[in-house]
Image: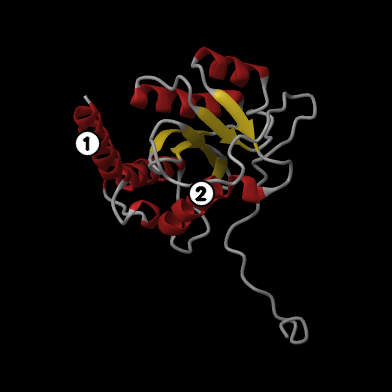
């Protein structure tokens, strides 16, 4: 109907490609299999890169490391580039938050930064097992993409861009803190990720005490 009347929808944001496949990069099996169920924290993570449009035409880029068990944003990094250091910063942030990521799985798409030797070396150093979905299949990492969409929808509120990079960074910093401490999630019973993890730890401690 729109075509018949020469109408077109408004596209508020320009499309920016954040997944750049690297045919020479390492490939890893899918250890998540679209199973984004909640459960024990610090066992499975998903991550992605999204762009943050700036009014002057530039972009910032946000890399994330989200705990599937609790939905907590355990690590994130913002930069004006999409080099490997960006995703390394997000994983290191999760490592600092958790104290250890040993034995955890990190799931991503086939972007060149995730398939790089440097990122694989960092995962090996932190004792993290890499996992990747199928090439060109967004559903294999849909939870991370849903996170990105929610962040930009709530921060931009229909605007096409942030006024400047400093404003974008401050907005993301405030939102990510609220995401873990105040934002309720239906997947974990309408409580916050931090509350879920505290409740999970208390229940686990009680179970171990009873067993002893």
Q: How many marks?
A: 2
Q: Residue at x 48, y 53 (%)?
A: 152
Quarter containing the C terminus = top left
Q: Position of residue 192 (x, y in %)?
A: 29, 48
In the visual, does 63 lie left or right of 72? right
Instruction: Say whether residue 162 is visible.
Output: no
Query: Could you classify mark 1 by the number of other residues whose Cα lies within 10 Å: few (under 14), some (14-19), or many (20 or more)?
Result: few
Badge nearest the viewer, 1 or 2: 1
Q: Which residue is mark 1?
A: 202
189 vs 46, nearest the viewer: 189
In the visual, does 95 lie left or right of 109? left
Q: Which residue is mark 2?
A: 148
Q: Residue at x 64, y 28 (%)?
A: 113
Quarter containing the N terminus = bottom right
Q: Position of residue 206 (x, y in %)?
A: 20, 34
Q: Residue at x 76, y 81 (%)?
A: 3
Instruction: Check disc 1 and report its element: helix, strand or loop.
Output: helix
Q: Residue at x 31, y 56 (%)?
A: 190
Instruction: Check disc 2 and report its element: helix, strand or loop.
Output: helix
212 vs 192, nearest the viewer: 212
Instruction: Report the Cα–Cα distance between label 1 and label 2.
Output: 31 Å
């Amino acid at each position: 109907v729109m075509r018949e009347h020469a109408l077109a929808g408004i596209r508020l944001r320009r499309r920016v490609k954040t997944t750049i496949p690297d045919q020479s990069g390492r490939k890893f099996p899918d250890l998540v299999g679209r199973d984004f169920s909640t459960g024990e924290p610090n066992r499975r993570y998903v991550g992605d890169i999204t762009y943050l449009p700036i009014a002057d035409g530039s972009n910032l880029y946000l890399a994330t490391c989200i705990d599937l068990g609790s939905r907590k944003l355990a690590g994130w990094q913002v930069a004006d580039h999409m080099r490997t250091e960006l995703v390394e910063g997000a994983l290191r942030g999760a490592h600092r938050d958790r104290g250890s990521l040993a034995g955890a799985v990190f799931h991503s798409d086939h972007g060149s930064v995730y398939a790089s030797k440097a990122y694989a070396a960092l995962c090996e150093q932190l004792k993290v097992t890499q996992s990747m979905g199928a090439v060109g299949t967004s559903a294999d990492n849909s939870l991370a993409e849903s996170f990105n969409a929610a962040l930009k929808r709530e921060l931009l509120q229909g605007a096409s861009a942030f006024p400047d990079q400093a404003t974008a960074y401050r907005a993301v910093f405030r939102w990510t803190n609220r995401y873990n401490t105040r934002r309720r999630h239906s997947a974990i019973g309408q409580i916050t990720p931090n509350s879920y993890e505290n409740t999970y730890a208390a229940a686990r401690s009680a179970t171990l005490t009873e067993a002893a």
